Image (spheres, grey):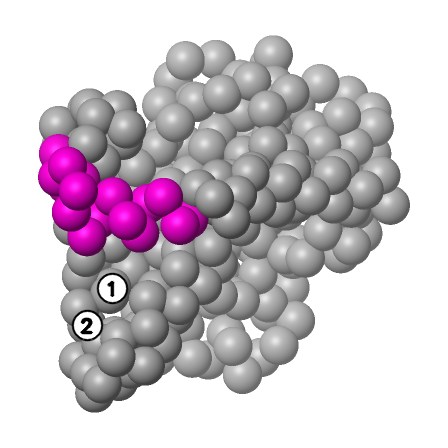
Amino acid sequence: MLRDKSIGCIGAGNMGSAIIAHLSKNIDRNNISIFDIDEEKIEYVKKNYNIVTHYTLQGLTDRSDIIIIAVKPDILPSVVKEIKGQLAKKIIVSIAAGIAISTIEDILKTPHKIVRVMPNMPAMIGSGMSVISPNINVEEESLNMVLEIFSYLGKVMILSEEYMDAVTALSGCGPAYGFMLIQAMTDSGVRMGIPRDKALILSAQTILGAAEMLIRTGEDPVVLRGRVTSPGGATIEAVHMLERLAFSGIVMDAIEAAKTRSKELGLK
């Protein structure tokens, strides 16, 4: 699908670099290019991934069929304004959190193919979760090309843009929640006398295994939890304590707060 297409990425930060890294393993590197205002970042990408680099936005835009805008949300409008005259017939992909498709459409004024994507941090190691929302101008072939790009970074899902703030709160911010849980479990292990490096491995692998089991079996987490909780056993004692302290409610409230903040950022 992407074999004959040229892909340009604007922004060589963490996510932009992750996209380039995984693309370079799967398609012709001569069809991948990048631009960033930080020349040190461009040189790093050029050295490590051996792709085409540009020192002007116009150079990248002219060359690319698909343009991925991987810059901070507050910078995106100025980037789009600078290249708006060069975007006809191109697929525009934005990964800027909180920026609605309508914001980009308002800048461009005329119909364009625009896809909004919310990836997350594990995309950097190919284990990410990316949610894709196209506008009405994106036909099936173009959508499939964007799906292919982000499939190299992990799992991909298509959802209506109306869910994007919730997606940001759930999967975009989600790795932080996972890290916090693993940290708390690790500290607990240390408190019980297990060396920190061992406790960390025990905690991280346990959460990884639980997630993988859920995905592979497709079973409800409540069902899987029930298999671990023997009557009168240690697990049900811990589950009782977590529920008595409103563990589920705290997590739900936290994710709702992240959703609210995502909406606020999009209005700025």
Residue at 47% x, 44% y is 244
Which mark, by number, is residue 201? 2
Q: What's the residue type where badge 2 is placed?
A: Ile
Q: Residues within 10 Å of mark 2 (few under 14, many from 20)?
A: few
The picture places residue 103, in percent across and down from the top left corner, at: 79, 32
Which of the pair 218/139 is nearer the observer?
218
Q: Is residue 46 visible?
A: no
Q: Quadrant of the N terminus?
A: top left
Residue 260 sits in quarter: top right
Q: Is residue 192 visible?
A: yes
Q: Is residue 230 magenta?
A: yes
The picture places residue 95, in percent across and down from the top left corner, at: 57, 44
Which of the pair 95/138 is nearer the observer?
95
The picture places residue 181, in percent across and down from the top left corner, at: 40, 60
In this figure, which residue is indicated by the disc labeled 1?
204
The secondary element bearing badge 1 is classed as helix
Q: What span is colored magenta in the figure?
A: 227-242
Which of the pair 197/8 is nearer the observer?
197
Q: Is residue 21 left or right of residue 258?
A: left
Residue at 19% x, 57% y is 206
